[in-house]
Each structure stands twice: as structure tokens, then as C-alpha cells.
Image: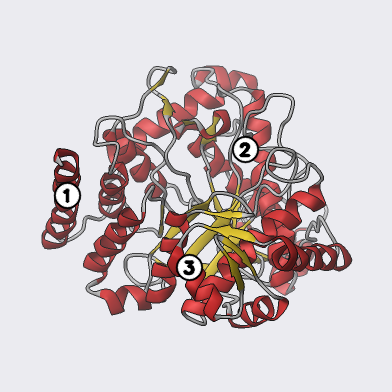
Amino acid sequence: MISSQDQCMASAHYFRMGEKECEKIHMATLEILERTGVDVHHERARDILDGGGASVDGIRVRIPEHMVTRALASAPRRLTLFDRSRKPAIRAWGYNTYYGGGSDCLNILDHRTGKRRLPLLKDVVEAARVMDSLPEIDFVMSLFLPSDVDQSIYDRYQMEVMLNQTTKPIVFVSPDFQGCVAAVEMCEAVAGGEDEFRRYPFATCYINVTSGLIANQEALEKCIYLAGKGLPQLWIPLNAGGVNSPATIAGCMANMNAGIMLGVVLSQLVRPGAPIAVPGWNGGPYNLQTMVGNYVLADEQGVPTTMGRYYNLPVFGLGGSTDSKVLDQQAGIEMTISLMTALLHGANIVHDVGFMESGLQGSLQLQVMANETIGFLRAATRGVTVDDETLALDVTDELGPTGTYLQHPHTIRHYKEPFYSKLFDKGGHAQWEKKGGLTMGEKAARMVDDILAGYTPRPLPEDVQQKIREIVEREQAWMDEERSR
């Protein structure tokens, strides 16, 4: 069964690898951890791993099989994120799939002008409002890196915006450890305290790890901190096959998986049962033709997600993206394929909806288009209810071969159930011309404008807004003081 937004779908999964292949990669991972080891660039992390039974030689850490086995036994199979009203919004386990935006695009494809430009903080605001309004988008990320705030602490401003502009779960990214701490402080202010946020976490940190065999200090600090608090984390080492790991899919995945298991082991040594998710993309060959880090490549599709399913751990996936620079046919194809493969492979928390140009550009139009595509995919893979009501044998017998079903009570009961897109044009040519002959991209731009003109997220209480603002101001004052030294 596939499940998306808690709707079960009796559809076949697409398994990129079988149990045998996963077992071989797992065994190779264990050999890499024991024989080669991982460079761990944080003294406290090395001490924790040493205390758990690892071998430490300078920064190189080698982890025996029993530590991995023990960690996998204690790592939760579930990762739950709540909305701001403390209702479960994301149940990340099994084949449940949820979609959301991405973070920190350096450019925006402006839906008003069609031009690529540097984003501002107001673009982060508009992106959060659009994501909060779209019914098929399940969580919010900042989407853009604002150029008009202090670049050393831009993430604090992003977090303030997201907390004020959405009630959905949030995935945040911080370039440094202190930013992660500040983000958690803001969340605790919204939740009403440390214990309340731990009990009803509505935000989680996406931790970028240098690679499978290199764990950077900031990532390790975040892992230890979040695990210590019992908060969920997304531990994401990524490899580029042929660049920093073998060019083959199996070799790249085994290499990357060593870094994934390092995070699982470390988190469970800090606090057994600390929730952690693993990556659902990369783990395959880099584009050695262009040497550009592409977001949608064929060979890697489903490989790390299948490994995550093998371990029965929550998977942080990627979909709804394109490497195209404009809203063209390539954008539509790659956006759709990446959304569908993430669903069929069983990635749980799928981010980067609306990303373009290898993650360097973001588009609100593409997010709106992806929202419609997700609705289509969920309808296309949803299970079919077969019972007396849906078989409607009495209705068929009543109306016979020549009867009309349009006004029958059975039709009235069910006619709203199918998926009807707000963007896909399904009428005749004359109807399309009468409505302005708009392309899907043009209609998406109008939809973005309509959302921004007519949709207002539920605000936080003013005293909570003030607490968050004080944290941001504190961080800005700290950074100003650091510069003055």
C-alpha cells in the first residue's frame, strides 16, 4: 500500500533494488566503516563515538558492526511532525509521502516579470504564504536566500518569517550551529516551552553533511544538540559519484551510506530513540558531462530511498524540481517525474518543490504547477473503493441502457470526488480562447497573484511574535559585536 496524506492507495511500488542488493550495500557499508572509516571533524562527537566502542585515530573514526546494529535497533521507525495547533500533520514512516518546498535559492524567477533576479526577504514571505495556502503542499521551507538581510544570519530572518506565515510544519536550514539553536529557541517560544516543543515538534532541521566519509563540525554539533533534546533531525550526507566517491551506483551508495550510518549511530549514542531521517536522493553518478550538481538525474532515482526502506527509517526525499532555467517542457517533465518517483519509491518528506536551475533558482509558478501535479498523482494512485455504493448495480438496473445519470441522486452524491485541476485546461479550443488563451505558466502566475492578494495565514499571538523578534534582534546584535572585534 502507498499512502499520501494518510490516503491509502492499493498501487504497486517501484523498488529500485531488491533485498539482495540492499543487503550487499549494507555489508559494504559495514566494511567501509570498519576498514576505511569516516573523518569526524568534531572532538566531542569523536569522544561520544569512542565511548560507544568506535576506534578513533586523529579525526578518523572506525565504527564496528555491533554499534550500527545497536543504533538501528533503537532509531525510531517513525518521525511525526505536527502543525501549529498540535495536530499530527506528517507521519513519516512506511510509504507515507508528504511534499514541501526547498530552501536558500540564490535567485528567483519572478512570476510578475518573468525575469531572474536576486530574492529579497519579501520573497521569502510570499513563498511561505503561497506554500501555506496550497492544499497539496504539506510543509514549508524558506525557498529563497534573501539578499537584503545580514548574510551571516539570514536564516534567523527566514525562520521568523516562516513561523509568522504558516501553520504547517517547517523544515529549516541553518549554515551554522548557533542558527540551529536560535531556530529551536523560536520554536520553543511558539510552542510554549521546551517540553511542549519536544512533545509536539512542528519543525525539524535539515542537516547538510559534507559527504559520506566527511562529517563536518557544524553538522555534528547539530546532530548532538537535536538528539540531546529528543527533537527530530534530517541527517543528510550526499555524494557525487565519480567526484568524491565511486562512479558506480552501488559504490557511491555504499560510500554515502557509511556517513548516513555514522549519523544514526551518533544520534542514538546521545539519546536512544532520538528521531532521525535519512536521505532519499543522490547515491549515484554525478553529471560528469557538465560538472553541474543536477537535481533530477535518472540513475540515482529511488536508490537511497530503497536503502531507507530497507532500514525502515524515515526518508527525506526530493521532488518537484527541474534543472531547467525557464518554465519550459523540460521543467514540466522533470518536475512531474521527480514527484512521481518519490511517491512510488516511498520517500516520506519530499522537499525542493519549486526548485529550478540545479537549486540556484526558485519559482512560485512552478510550486503552483507542482501542487496541481501532486493532486493528479495522488488521485491517479489512490486505491479504488469497491462496495455496493460504488458498484451502483441498483442505479444501473433502474436507468438501464438508455437512462441519463446526470441528475440521479447517486451522481449528485459522488460527482465532486474526482480530481479537477485548477490549472490544467480540459475544455475545447473555443473555450480556451474565450478565457484568454493562456498557457499553464501564465495561469500559474495569476494564481500566485490571487493567493497573495486574497490569502492571509493565521497569525501568531502578538506576544509570541515579539519573543521571536527579540531572538532575531539578539542574534543581529551578537553578529554586529563579533564583527567589531
Please determine whether, in this image, residue 265 is positioned above or below residue 21. Answer: below
Disc 2/disc 3 C-alpha distance (Å):
31 Å
Which of the two marks, 1 or 2, is nearer to us in this view? 1
Q: Quadrant of residue 462?
A: bottom left
Q: How many numbered markers are drawn?
A: 3
3 or 1: tag closer to the N-terminus: 3
- The residue that label 1 is drawn on is 478
Q: Position of residue 450 (x, y in %)?
A: 35, 34
Examine the rendered structure and indicate whether residue 241 appears above or below residue 378: above
Q: Is residue 192 visible?
A: yes
Q: Is disc 1 placed on a helix, strand or loop?
A: helix
Between marks 3 and 1 in the image, the one whose residue lies nearer the viewer: 3
Q: Which quadrant is the C terminus positioned in?
A: top left
> Is 39 displayed left or right of 129 in the figure?
right
The N terminus sits in image quarter? bottom right
Please state if 202 lies on the left or on the right of 57 as rendered: left
Tell me which amino acid carries mark 3.
Ala
Judging by the rendered image, the residue that carries numbered circle 3 is: 45
The part of the image, by quadrant, that contains residue 27 is: bottom right
Mark toward the start of the polypeptide (1 vs 2)? 2
Q: Identify whether 169 is placed above or below 251.
A: below
